[in-house]
Image: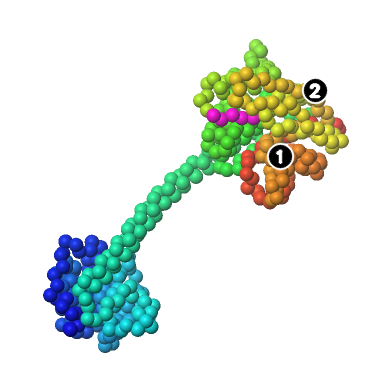
Amino acid sequence: MGYLGNLAEVDIDIGSQPQVIRRVLVVDDSRLQRRIVSMVLTRWGFDVTEADDGAEALAICRSHPPDLVISDWVMPGMDGLEFCRAFRDLPRDSYGYFILLTSKSEKDDIACGLDAGADDFLTKPVNPSELRARIAAGDRILRMERELTEKNRLIASTLDELQKLYDSLDSDLIEARKLQQSLVSDRYRDFGVADVSLLLRSSGHVGGDLVGMFPVSDNRIGLYAIDVSGHGISSALMTARLAGYLSAVAPEQNLALFHAGAGQYRMRPPAETIAALNKLILDEMDTELYFTMILADVDLARGKVVLAQAGHPHPAIQRADGSIEWIGEGGLPVGLLPAATFEQVRFDLGPGERLLIHSDGIVECADKAGSLLDHEGLSAMLSDLRDIRGPACLEALIWILSEYSGTSDFGDDVSAILLEFKPDG
């Protein structure tokens, strides 16, 4: 039987030809055998190129990469094995299938061919049906490879688009963070007999915490702390709207104030204002968000404070002797129940005493073992910071909190108001 058996006499239906393998390179030092294989492959519908040795074949592969290579193993100069290794080293956009023609049948020889990069083998003389089946198998593999490549290209393109959207959103969120932080433009104010310091630190770009103060009269101020449920943009938008209801620059828009005539404003009872906010949220806003809140009316001249608490953590009073008191009635958050009522507490602050209103991001901060700071831990911190005042005290509080949790990236927003009456003398 000849080199290719009766392959040239076999007619195979071109309509069943592979769809992926189109360009075939036949490599053999025998011109006759190359022509026989090329003729049959051409009849099957393939675009066939010939080379008589490995060096010529390699040059063709560089200029016109084939989908399939059928190469004899034994050739003068660069043999099929060396050519296969060189073929695998060439840069390609897609995978090329390599069939090695050989009379070798030992397992070691087959392993050597696979190590060199061959995908399949055909023993001489070639059976036409076997050649057809090997090409079909190669076509399936290339089809899967190219489908995967296309899917990867689409995924990469989609990821690029998503990255652009993320970068745009990230830029918008950075600007949103600046805008939210601008809601607390006055972080420290000296009122003569007392100082007020504010802290607002979001766990993400934007958050749901808000703290602020607004003037009522020469010797009276309002303080508020808000923590909207959830995190992110929706919570931040809610804080922006609530800031408008407690405006420090437009008293006529501030729900906590009422006009008393002659251009003067007075503060409503804090519990009454929180109840009004509760009704407004439930009646006018189509939202599932709710928020906790503290609103305080501070008489600076007399050191008297009226405070209403709506689900917000209990504030801490640090007396002149360093002792800590926790105050407040707890209460329900705002925006849950239409009939919710809110209670007020009254207390006095003397010289050298201070009030800390804080969010749950502080007392619910966890260490590496998962233990919460809680009120006991915050009491210890305030005791350690007894001699540090103003913004420096709040900055030190953040530093200690970072040490406690093991990270400066807190899992929740952190906010606080520090009202400090100055010592006598």
- Residue, disc 1: 363
- The picture quadrant where one finds residue 18 is bottom left
Residue 4: x %, y % from top left = 19, 80
Front one among 290 and 299 = 290
Provide residue 35's location: percent of width, then percent of height.
15, 78
Q: In this view, does 117 lie to the left or right of 133?
A: right
Q: Where is residue 286 in the image (x, y as percent from the top left)?
A: 51, 25
Which amino acid type corresponds to the residue marked 2 in the rendered image?
Arg
Q: Identify the residue at image location x=57%, y=43%.
A: 204
Q: Where is mark 2, residue-wise?
A: 302
| In this view, the mark in front (1 or 2) | 1
Q: Callout 2: 10 Å neighbours few (<14), some, many (20+)? A: few
Point 56% across, 42% down: residue: 205
Query: Residue sitting at 15 percent across and 82 percent down?
Result: 32
Q: Crowding near pointer 1: few (<14 within 10 Å), some, many (20+)?
A: some
Q: Please provide the residue range marked out in magenta.
A: 288-292
Q: How is the model colour-coded?
A: rainbow
Pick the quarter of the image with the N terminus: bottom left
Check disc 1 and report its element: helix, strand or loop: helix
